[in-house]
Amino acid sequence: MVKKIQEFHLNFNKEFFPKWKGVSYDEKLLYLSIALAGEVGELSNVVKKRHRKKIHELKADDINEEEYKKKITEELVDVFVYTVLFSNELGIDLEKEFYKKMEKNKIKFKNGSTK
Ligand SMILES: [Mg+2]
């Protein structure tokens, strides 16, 4: 399933960002790491605003549960998009690596470790 998404994005990139292939490897990774961190920041900001509103009992920035979830969803998808892009750039099979990592986590948590 993720493989299909990775392939989709490869074609998407070719169609909409044809100059991407001319960018150097290091520049691509630099750009992608900044973009990914930026999207994680945007996600955190959505949650932060909600938290700040609660703590200070602010009336401003009032959004309902549906809007809140919609904003979080958008940012999570942005994080995923850059994760896919980053993986594609490095030739990483994201689905395979996901399951590999979860197997490692199983062992770790079975042993009572959180590190
Ligand atoms: Mg975003």
Image: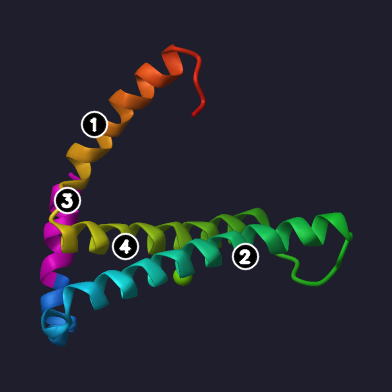
Q: Position of residue 51 (x, y in %)?
A: 75, 56
Would you say 16 lies left or right of 29 here? left
- How far apart are the alpha carbons under marks 1 and 4? 21 Å
- How far apart are the alpha carbons under marks 4 and 2? 18 Å
Q: Position of residue 26 (x, y in %)?
A: 23, 73
Mark 3 surroundings within 10 Å by alpha-carbon count, few (fewer than 14), some (14 through 19), many (20 or more): some
Question: Which residue in the protein does label 4 denote?
Answer: 81
Would you say 83 lies left or right of 64 here? left
Disc nearer the start of the sequence (1/4): 4
State whether label 4 is within 8 Å of ligand 1. Answer: no
Question: Which residue in the protein does label 2 denote?
Answer: 45
- Which amino acid lies under the numbered mark 4 shown in the image of this protein? Val
Disc nearer the start of the sequence (3/1): 3
- How far apart are the alpha carbons under marks 3 and 1? 12 Å
Q: Is residue 90 magenta?
A: no
Mark 1 surroundings within 10 Å by alpha-carbon count, few (fewer than 14), some (14 through 19), many (20 or more): few
Report helix, strand or loop for mark 3. loop
